[in-house]
């Protein structure tokens, strides 16, 4: 879950320094895992705060290891990682969002994953792919993220909507029915513009078999599939089914609770927000897979755990990461955070195996699409953000907007 833009220019400037400080790799001076030592770990956002409790449990079972957790805000994470890498002072273990991985791998700052200790088959394909650069894996998936459809089941009954929309056509029909028959102000909440609008658009784009850039680096945002997806997306605003102007910091759960918004696409953390903040809504909402166009495909996100190439504690770091990413550790982490386990074995028992909502998340994650590895991905997606807003605000057609984005993106791809 990576919420901040990378700074490619800084990375390039520091590349030579990193070559000197992060080229050690698996040296012979690594401290054995059973020796007394301190393991330094940086983790971001809520995960950084929650991980300290897990570390205490780990220390009791491994008294020779002291785990020092440093929580880092996502808004400053990239800057701190780059500065630490340049100074040769990265922690032993780092949480890393998918859009950081290629940059730090290219710098030589990350230790390749031991694929005998961590096997690809144990993780969701999308989770593993996010940590793999040029056939080398640098990150072990810690948790995964995707988007599904949240919808009000009680208002659906009033609207005469008998089941969750299964197709994109049914999604728009349901949005219209919610407005006309259930009296909601809007039919579907999707982002009209601004930073990271593309994350709202991915569900439409990927399900229409569209892409921004192919995995081999070819820009295709003005393909027929992408144009069709943006025309569909824009139609919600043209028909008054979605709000054209959403204020910064908008919290869709408030309008979901007030009956103003009956449907939205959201990540797993929304389940906890709804349960904690609006207990009266319990039993009145559900989740469903992204409605099918050519397919039912959502975006893939999440975070991986990486080891610094310069760490003197690689063996202990690997054992700590194993603890966090095996089935037992992943089940415990889900209970603490509601982050979706990246290890597929964690989904075979308990609530993860039996809860109908969790089955929806699992099915969506199995088909989720990973963004291609591009150092300037944030710049690339910002061009798509602009194109989407141009359409939602009736400033241009989908084709005109995406043709322009295509031209701008061509100079940014690697």
Image (tube, rainbow, N blue to C red):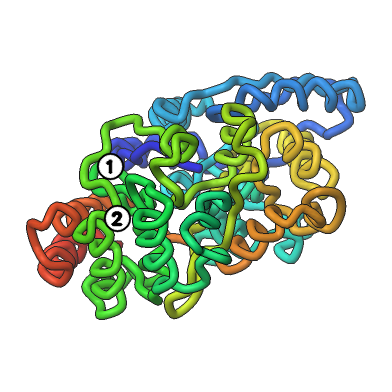
In percent of the image, x 46 and y 40: which residue is there? 256
Q: Indicate the position of residue 233 as horizontal and vertical percent values.
A: 29, 63
In percent of the image, x 50 and y 63: which residue is there? 160
Q: Residues within 10 Å of mark 1 (few under 14, many from 20)?
A: some
* C-alpha separation, residue under disc 2 versus residue under disc 1: 21 Å
Closer to us: 90 or 281: 281
Q: Indicate the position of residue 259 as horizontal and vertical percent values.
A: 44, 40
Labels 2, 1: front one: 2
Where, quadrant-wise, is the C terminus in this rendering? Answer: bottom left
> What residue sits right under mark 1 in the picture?
195
Q: Is residue 142 left or right of residue 288?
A: right
Q: Is residue 107 left or right of residue 14?
A: right
Q: Indicate the position of residue 395 as horizontal and vertical percent values.
A: 7, 57
Closer to us: 191 or 284: 284
Closer to us: 366 or 234: 234
Disc tally is 2
Residue 241's disc number: 2
Residue 18's disc number: none
Q: Residues within 10 Å of mark 2 (few under 14, many from 20)?
A: many
Give residue 116's quadrant in the image: bottom right
Secondary structure type for disc 2 = loop
Q: Answer whether residue 270 is visible to the viewer in this image.
A: yes
Q: Answer whether residue 43 is visible to the viewer in this image.
A: no
In percent of the image, x 31 and y 70: which residue is there? 229
């Amino acid at each position: 879950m990576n919420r901040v833009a990378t700074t490619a220019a800084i990375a390039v400037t520091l590349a030579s320094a990193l070559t000197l400080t992060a080229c050690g790799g698996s040296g012979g001076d690594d401290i054995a895992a059973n020796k007394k030592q301190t393991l330094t770990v940086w983790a971001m956002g809520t995960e950084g705060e929650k991980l300290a409790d897990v570390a205490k449990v780990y220390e009791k079972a491994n008294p020779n290891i002291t785990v020092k957790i440093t929580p880092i805000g996502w808004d400053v994470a990239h800057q701190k990682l780059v500065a630490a890498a340049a100074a040769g002072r990265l922690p032993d273990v780092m949480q890393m969002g998918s859009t950081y991985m290629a940059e730090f791998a290219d710098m030589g700052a990350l230790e390749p994953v031991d694929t005998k200790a961590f096997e690809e088959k144990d993780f969701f394909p999308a989770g593993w792919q996010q940590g793999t650069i040029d056939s080398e894996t640098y990150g072990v998936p810690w948790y995964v993220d995707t988007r599904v459809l949240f919808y009000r089941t009680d208002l659906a009954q009033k609207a005469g909507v008998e089941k969750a929309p299964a197709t994109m056509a049914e999604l728009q029909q349901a949005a219209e029915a919610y407005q006309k028959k259930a009296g909601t102000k809007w039919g579907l909440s999707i982002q009209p513009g601004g930073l990271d609008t593309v994350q709202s658009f991915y569900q439409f784009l990927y399900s229409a078999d569209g892409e921004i850039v192919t995995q081999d680096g070819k820009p295709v945002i003005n393909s027929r599939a992408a144009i069709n997806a943006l025309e569909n997306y824009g139609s919600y605003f043209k028909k008054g089914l979605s709000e054209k102007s959403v204020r910064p910091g908008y919290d869709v759960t408030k309008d979901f609770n007030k009956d103003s918004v009956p449907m939205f696409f959201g990540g797993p953390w929304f389940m906890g927000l709804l349960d904690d903040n609006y207990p009266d809504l319990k039993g009145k909402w559900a989740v469903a897979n992204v409605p099918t166009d050519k397919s039912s495909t959502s975006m893939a996100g999440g975070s991986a755990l990486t080891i610094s190439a310069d760490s003197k504690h690689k063996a202990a770091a690997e054992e700590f990461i194993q603890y966090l990413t095996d089935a037992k550790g992943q089940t415990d982490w889900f209970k603490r955070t509601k982050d979706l386990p990246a290890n597929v074995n964690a989904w075979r028992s308990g609530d993860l195996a039996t809860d109908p909502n969790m089955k929806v998340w699992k099915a969506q994650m199995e088909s989720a699409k990973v963004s291609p590895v591009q150092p300037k991905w944030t710049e690339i997606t910002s061009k798509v953000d602009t194109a989407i807003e141009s359409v939602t605000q009736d400033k241009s057609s989908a084709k005109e907007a995406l043709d322009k984005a295509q031209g701008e993106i061509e100079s940014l791809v690697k």
